[in-house]
Image: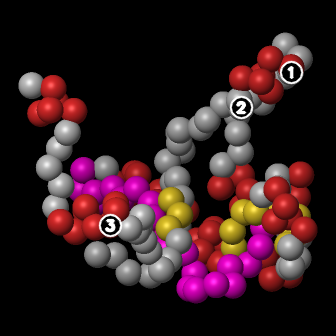
Amino acid sequence: MNAYSKNREVSAQEAVARTCSLKLKSSSRSVIFLPTDDNAVKMSLPMKYLQTMDDDVENVWMTGFPDKYKARPNRPEFENMRMTEFASEYRIVYGRQKKGKLVLPLQQNMGHIQKRTRGKPAVIRFARFSQQKNPEKFYGTLLKLPITSQR
């Protein structure tokens, strides 16, 4: 019984991939999800930050991609840029990467971004709503993320 509950059968391909430490999944493009819902799920700040904050501070949420888009650099190339373009052509950088080439600071100390140089622009994913079942969310998504083709 213990052998059946603790082990599982794998295919020959998976066994070779695990033995040779090969990746089971890889992609040539990055994928980024953009929330379009007005009540999108937000994560709170880590507990170590919350414990050191004053009791009267109301902003206890981490910043998401829409917040970073709103704080994009005040430069001509970003002036008329849509959120989908911003997400697919730029990436958020952290830590030592902030000192890299062509790194731009976001406004309001929201972090840093860098133009994607390797490969192609990122693929944008978003929640899709039915036009018949949920027309408000369907058209709201179209307003927030202008999409050239609907499938």
Q: Position of residue 44 (x, y in %)?
A: 66, 31
**CB atoms at circles 1 and 2 under 8 Å apart?**
yes
Measured Cα–Cα span from mark 1 to mark 2? 10 Å
- Main SS type for the magenta part? loop
Q: From the image, tell me which residue sits under label 1.
A: 53
User: What are the residue bounds of the magenta stretch?
Assistant: 113-133
**Which of the 4 image quarters holds residue 102?**
bottom right
Query: Which of labels 2 and 3 is toward the front?
Result: 3
Q: What residue type is labelled 2?
A: Leu
- Residue shown at the point (31%, 50%) measured from the top left: 134
Q: What residue type is labelled 3?
A: Ala
Q: What residue type is labelled 1?
A: Met
Report helix, strand or loop for mark 1.
loop
Lower position in the chain sequence, tag 2 or tag 3: 3
Whether residue 65 sits left or right of residue 58 in the image: it is left
Q: From the image, tell me which residue sits under label 2.
A: 45
Whether the magenta-drawn stretch holds residue 44 is answered as no
Q: Where is residue 150 in the image (x, y as percent from the top left)?
A: 34, 76
Q: From the image, tell me which residue sits under label 3.
A: 17
Whether the magenta-drawn stretch holds residue 114 is answered as yes
Measured Cα–Cα span from mark 2 to mark 3? 38 Å
